[in-house]
Image: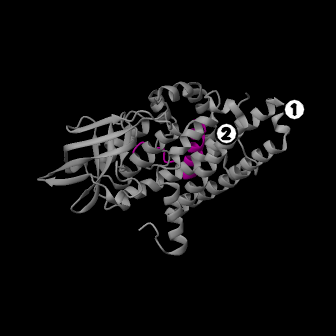
Amino acid sequence: MSHYKGVDFYQLDRNLSEDERGVRETVRRFVDQRFLPDVKKHFRDGTFPLELATEMGSMGLLGSAINGPDCPGLSYTMYGLICEELERGDSGLRSFASVQGSLVMWPIATYGTEQQKQQWLPALAAGHKIGCFGLTEPDHGSDPGGMKTHAKRDGEDWILNGTKLWITNANTADVAVVWARCSEGVVGFLVERGTPGFSTNPIHGKFSLRASDTGELVFDNVRLPESSRLPLAKGLRAPLACLNEARYGIAWGAVGAAKDCYDTALRYAGQREQFGKPLSGFQLVQQKLVTMLTEITKAQALVLQLARLKDDGVNDVPLVSLSKRNNVAMALDCARTARDILGAAGITDEFSPGRHMANLESVITYEGTHDIHTLIVGAEITGVAAYR
C-alpha cells in the first residue's frame, strides 16, 4: 500500500504554523521508518523497542512540552501533533513518551527541587534514563484516594510500603514517581531502581498494549531519604494534575490511531474487489468510511482548540476530560469499523486496525475510564459531583 499522507478533510492544517507542520512531518517519518517496520514483531513478542529511546530523546519527543534543564520546551500544540503521530504507529509508543514526559518529567519539573531537576530532567529528556509513574494499585484504579501504599517517617528518612499495578515502563524504568499516603496526606517520591526493597514484576498475558512494558511495582520497607520526596507535591491534587497532562496527549494520540485505521480501510476498500467492483463502490462501505471521516474531523477540531487553549494557559481538567473521552471512544469505533471493512484480513496483524482495536481497549480505560471522564464533565456542567 502507498505511503500515509495524512487525513485533513476540513483543511485544519491551515491553522498550523510551518514549524508545527514541520515537527509533525519529522515524527511521521520517524514512525514510518524506525518504528512501523518492527511493530508487528514487538506486538507478537510482547516487547517494546527500548533502543529507540535515545533517538526519540535526540528528536525532542520525550517531555516535549516540559520546561527545565535540557528539556525541549515546545508548545502544547507541537506536543499534541507528536502524540498523534506516535499513536498512529502504536498506542504503546505514545504511552512510552506520555509516561516519560507527562507523568515523570512534568512532576519533577513542577514539584521537584532544583537538585532533582538537574539530576533527572536532562537524562530523561535524552532517553538515557527511563521513568515510570506509580499511582494505580491492585484495588484502587478510578479511586486513587483509597490507595493503600503508605509512607511513614523514621527519623530523617521515610519507610515506604505498598504495591502499584498496571504501570507502563515498570520493568525498564530507572526511576519511579511513586505516590503514597502518610499522616500528612498524599506525598510523592522519586524511587531509584536498585533501592533495597524495591522490585518490579512484568505483567504477562496481555491482549492489549503488547508493544509496551507493563508491570507491578513492589515496595517492601523501602528506606528513602527526605531528598527523594517531591516537596511541592501536596495532596491528591498533585498526581491528578500529572494525569491531566497525560490525558491531553492521549486525546491527540487517539486521533492518530483513528486516522491510521481510516486510511488503511480506505485504501483496502479501493483495492479489494467483490461482485465485480471495488468495495469502495458499495453504498454501505462508503457510509462507514464517511462516518469514520466525520468523527475524525470533529475530533481533530476538538484537540486543536484544546491545544490552543493550553498554549494560552487555560488548563481546566473538564476540557481535557471531554477530549479524552470523545476521542478515544471515537478511535475505538473507527478501529472496529475498519476491521469490519477489511473482513477476515482485519483479524490478522498484517493490517493495523486489529492491533489498534486491542490497544484502544486499554486506552479507553487508563488515565481515567470513559465513565469517570463522563462524570468529571458532568460535575462541571451541573455542579454536582456524582462520583462521590
For disc 2, the marked residue is 261
Would you place residue 282 above or below residue 179 in this image?
above
Q: Position of residue 341 (x, y in %)?
A: 73, 38
The quadrant the C terminus occupies is: bottom left
Asked whether 273 or 12 is in front, the reply is 273
Residue that extends furthest to the bottom in the rendered view of this protein: 383
Residue that extends furthest to the right in the rendered view of this protein: 276
**Residue at image coords 51%, 27%:** 42
Q: Which three-letter amino acid code belongs to the residue tagged 2?
A: Cys
User: Quick check: 157 left or right of 52?
Assistant: left
**Residue at image coords 21%, 42%:** 220
Q: Position of residue 257 (x, y in %)?
A: 61, 42
For disc 1, the marked residue is 277
Q: What count of labels does the image hold?
A: 2
Q: Residues within 10 Å of mark 2 (few under 14, many from 20)?
A: many
Q: Which residues are magenta?
A: 69-89
Q: Secondary structure at mark 1?
A: strand
Q: Which of pointers 1 and 2 lies earlier in the amino acid sequence?
A: 2
